[in-house]
């Protein structure tokens, strides 16, 4: 088959018009076009394999991060519960101490009102005990 001599523009236009039909009909031309393009583009299997590996890596990272978050949340909740328990213990201790120092909060201070009065029944070494010792001493 001989082709008439044409300029570059008409050759390009002819290729654009004829190539799709020729590739569909001629297996040899189709393989030639695929071979030329294979050097520039990855084939479908390699591309899908890469995408699958990336998706698996993202899934593993997400699962690992989920486990870390769950662990952090559990630790936070445990610490919060321990803090709440400690807070309740402090409240109970403060109530006990206030009842020991001032058994009846509505009663007048009585003998404790003057400096040098009796030392309240508070644990040894507390600031109040040291205060009362100095004040009465």
Image: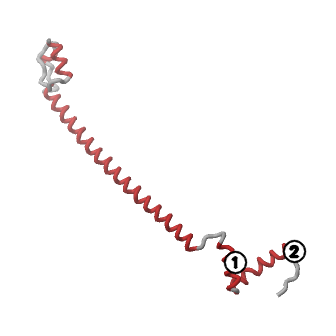
Which x, y percent locates residue 48?
54, 71
Question: In the figure, is residue 89 to the left or right of 13?
Answer: left
Q: Nearer the viewer, residue 106 or 54?
A: 54
Query: Which residue is drawn at the image coordinates 69% and 79% (left, top)?
Result: 32
Reply above or below: 108 against 7: above
Element at label 1 = helix
Query: Which residue is drawn at the image coordinates 40% and 57% (left, top)?
Result: 64
User: Colour mode?
Assistant: secondary structure
Element at label 2 = loop
Quarter of the figure with residue 39:
bottom right
Residue contact between numbered discs 1 and 2, judged by CB atoms under 8 Å: no
Reply above or below: 125 against 19: above
Question: In the figure, is residue 49 to the left or right of 112?
Answer: right
Determine which of the numbered discs, if any, sits on residue 100 in the image. Answer: none
Query: Which residue is drawn at the image coordinates 35% and 50% (left, top)?
Result: 72
- In the rendered image, the quadrant that contains the C terminus is top left
The answer to which of marks 1 and 2 sits earlier in the sequence is 2
**Which residue lies under the disc numbered 2?**
7
Q: Nearer the viewer, residue 99 or 36?
A: 36
**Which residue lies under the disc numbered 1?**
33
Question: Mark 1 packing: few (<14 Cα in 10 Å), some, or many (20+)?
Answer: few
């Amino acid at each position: 088959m001989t082709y008439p001599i044409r300029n570059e523009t008409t050759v390009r236009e002819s290729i654009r018009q004829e190539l799709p039909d020729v590739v569909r009909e001629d297996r040899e031309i189709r393989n030639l076009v695929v071979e030329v393009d294979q050097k520039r583009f990855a084939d479908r299997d390699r591309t899908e394999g890469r995408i699958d590996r990336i998706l698996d890596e993202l899934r593993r990272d997400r699962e690992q991060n989920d486990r870390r978050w769950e662990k952090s949340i559990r630790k936070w909740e445990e610490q919060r519960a321990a803090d709440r328990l400690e807070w309740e213990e402090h409240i109970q201790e403060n109530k006990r101490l206030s009842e020991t120092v001032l058994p009846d909060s509505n009663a007048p201070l009585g003998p404790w009102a003057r400096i040098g009065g009796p030392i309240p029944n508070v644990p040894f070494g507390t600031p109040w005990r040291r205060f009362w010792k100095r004040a009465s001493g």
